[in-house]
Amino acid sequence: MTSSDDQRLRDLARLRRVRDRIDREYARPLDVTALARGEHMSAGHLSREFRRAYGESPYSYLMTRRIERAMALLRRGDLSVTEVCFAVGCSSLGTFSTRFAELVGMPPSVFRRECARGTEGIPACVAKHATRPVRNREAREPATSLA
């Protein structure tokens, strides 16, 4: 194994630790600089390598985690959209609502209202899977006809 292979493996281990930290601490204030500092990397290097490894920036990954959690909280129906926004670590209701609509296809207020009706009687684990946001890179290609 060459030294460049060794470096790549070390970088991948660092990236996994960053991703795991985002998964655990999504509701805390996180920024790329702090995440990079925690792994002794520059913010630019972390962003480039994270995107190369996972197909999206660390910020995009963080926002997806926050939106997934927000969907679960909105499904419960006992919190307002503003309360959910701050509970998942977002500091701007406008940014939260915009990103939510991009990933889910509807504003959080509509999701909250519709989801309360649409998932009644369905186990929470099934509802979570069925209503999970789809990032652009995960969207399925339309089936092509062979006729």
Image (cartoon, rainbow, N blue to C red):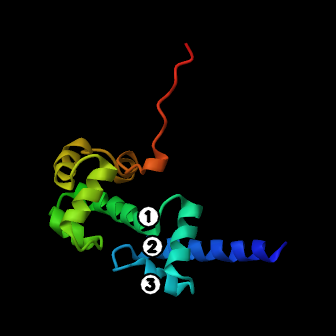
| Label 2 Cα neighbours within 10 Å, binned few <14 / some 14-19 / many ≥20 | many
Where is residue 24, by image quadrant?
bottom left
The amino acid at mark 2 is Ile
The amino acid at mark 3 is Ala
**Residue 53 in view, yes or no:** yes
Depth check, front residue: 126 or 139 = 139
Ranked by sequence position, the earlier of labels 3 and 1 is: 3
Mark sitting on residue 22: 2
Q: Is residue 126 left or right of residue 72?
A: right
- Mark 2–mark 1 Cα distance, whole angstroms, equals 8 Å
- Which residue shows up at 77% across the image and 71% down it? 5
The amino acid at mark 1 is Tyr
Depth check, front residue: 70 or 105 = 105
Label 1 sits on residue:
61
- Which residue shows up at 44% across the image and 82% down it? 33
Where is residue 75, by image quadrant?
bottom left
- Mark 2–mark 3 Cα distance, whole angstroms, equals 11 Å
Mark sitting on residue 34: 3
Q: Is residue 34 left or right of residue 16?
A: left
